[in-house]
Image (spheres, coloured by chain):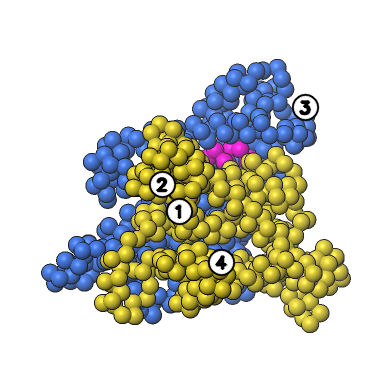
Chain colours: A blue, B yellow
Amino acid sequence: MRFLAKRIGFYVLAAWAAVSLNFLIPHFLPGGPVEAALSRFQGQLSAQAATALAAEFGLGAHQGFLPQYWHYLDDVVHGNLGVSFTYFPEPVSTVIGQSLPWTVVMVGLAIIIAWCLGTLIGIVMGARRGSWIDGLLPGAAFIRGLPQFWIGLLAVGFLAIKLGWFPASGGYSASLATPSFTVAFIGSAIQHAILPVLCIVAGSMVGNMILMRNMMVTTLAEEYVQAAEAKGLPRSRVMFAYAARNAILPSVVSFALELGFTVSGALLVEEIFSYPGIGFVLFQAIGNEDYPLMQGIFLIITLAVLGANIVADLTLSVLDPRTRSGEDAR
Amino acid sequence: MKAARSVVPGPGRSGTGLRGRLALAVRAGRRSPKLIAGTAILSLFAFVTAFGPLLAPDNPSADSQQILSGPSLHHLLGTTYSGQDVLSELLTGTRTTILAAVVAALLAELISVAIGVTAGYLGGLPGEGLSAVANVVLVLPVLPLEIILAAYFPNLDWLGVALIIAITSWPFNARVLRAQTLSMRRRPFVDAARSAGEPNWRIIATVIVPNLRAVILTGLLFNLLFATLVQTSLAFLGIGNVTDWSWGTMFYWIENAQASLRGAWWWYVPPGLCIGLFGLGLGLVNLGLDEHLNPRLRRLRRPAAARRRARSLPIPAALAGDDRPEAGLASR
């Protein structure tokens, strides 16, 4: 349990660092762009919203640095992330609250599928090293270099527009006016999610696959695996219970380490499909110089990634006995 | 072939003069077709980076009446929504893209070495502190972090974008290097340097870092691909100066004109293929180097012999164990 306590301590530190960075960046970088964007809303902001924005972005000198930091921390703890310029006068927290569930379900599902599929294929590739399957490696190197959003562009252009197999954009059919928990709506939502999920899986599966394959090759040369083979255990048992069980650990660690990047890539796929998630909102925010929304999205994505990291650590502590005996397996 | 040369192990390394070294590189290359293919692809991109704007048949920013026309003899890769020549944009944009990737990759690796090796060598509280900083920056999602940094500098040029990528993408390699340094810190040759009274910075610079060159090289390859992907994603989102041609800004205009909905495949396919090809070149060089350093990953032509060899050779932990730098190339 010391392992988990240490890790949770680390995540608290990381969360504090993210929250503070979110405050420090606007304070130390040139404030001109924010003031210019803010001036468009002169007179429309309530007094309370104006002071909150001033504290977050370090505008106006009537408050010192530390009181502003305090004010900002207080706002963050209460979920007050300011007012969005794009969706004025909606607060940032409302805008994020509406788009976050879409992202969590679609992107979350895609990343989990990608990891499981990549691991499985990697195990098979490792087990059959030296066969024709090795010839696929350069192809894999090609795919893992591709940006996910480009795979999305291809999918829209060819599968959705040219062949008409899938809807090209949106999270649900435009004929269903508002989201609801009806069969028609959920069916439409699933239909719209298939293609973006496929793109994210295709884009982010390959890396884990190659890692898993190489770890399998390395593990299969270990003496305990050869001993298991010599005992005459069934091949599948040697592969999964002896080799894969140990080879999978780095793959769990790298899943956690790379999650921030995987999620970033997936957010761009949302934009390609005009999927109503966080990535699409982020694109709007950049286009409209909506600083409070950008900052809020950074904060939310970071916290989500930290949360997923904790889950990965829990998994690791189940899989790797070294973590339970207090050794630092990371 | 530079890459191959620097990792050729054994007595051959002392091969004198350029000719001896070239011969060695060729021999290493013949054993690894992957290395040759990868180097050829990267050379092609280096060539286009140097001469791309001269090769471009048109001014990439010149509008014309021919809107969204497919590939033809006049426009080999067709035209954009404002009638610009796609091939010219691609050739001109390659320079900015590759230059920014190279600058970002080198700078990030420099930070990784400085922080990772120092953290590993010092150990104790200072080492733990540096390592904690690296781990915190590592869990922050790169793209949103870079967006909130870049958003405060409107019309950032490629150098600015490269700097932002460098200061946010060093932690992964720093972690790898720290782990490597930790395992090297108590080896006899380091102890020898220490007892000879060498100052810490000299031990790091002349003993530790040269021994990490394979790991550093792998890290650089990884950084190049990572920087290209991130830079393209940022430009696609409209960060930086969108009128400055790069593969990423091409994607910005592609998305702006909804090219995929209009069926203009000649516009959105080429820049993605370029990124994929560049990644393939880096990946092939990486695979080639990997097989060179870790015989277990080679194709087993003579299984028994290969196994015997594999067991007698020490495998650098970074290439065989948890902290495989290539793990990152993966889904990143």
Give the residue number, with chain letter if any, for mark 1: B212
Picture residue at 36% right of the left edge, 55% below the top: B317
First to last magenta residue range: A293-302
Q: Chain letter of disc 4?
A: B
Q: Chain letter of disc 3?
A: A
Q: Identify the disc placed on residue B2.
A: 4
- For the residue marked with disc 2, what is the amino acid? Thr
Residue A288 can be seen, yes or no: yes
- Give the foreground label among 4 and 3: 4
Is B212 situated above or below B62? above
Choose the circle earlier in sequence order: 1 or 4.
Answer: 4
- Give the foreground label among 3 and 2: 2
Q: Chain letter of disc 2?
A: B
A223 left or right of B115?
A: left
Circle 1: is it few (<14), some (14-19), or many (20+) Cα within 10 Å? some
Image location of residue A292, percent across then percent down: 64, 36
Circle 2: is it few (<14), some (14-19), or many (20+) Cα within 10 Å? many
Disc 4 with disc 2 on a shared chain: yes
- Give the foreground label among 1 and 3: 1
- For the residue marked with disc 1, what is the amino acid? Leu
Residue A182 can be seen, yes or no: no
Q: Disc 3 to disc 2, how far (Cα)?
A: 58 Å
Q: Check if mark 2's residue and mark 1's residue have beta carbons within 8 Å.
A: yes
A9 left or right of A284?
A: left
- Circle 3 — which element? loop
Q: Disc 1 to disc 3, how far (Cα)?
A: 60 Å
Q: Disc 4 to disc 3, how far (Cα)?
A: 63 Å
Q: Disc 1 to disc 4, how far (Cα)?
A: 17 Å
- For the residue marked with disc 4, what is the amino acid? Lys
Q: Is residue B106 magenta?
A: no
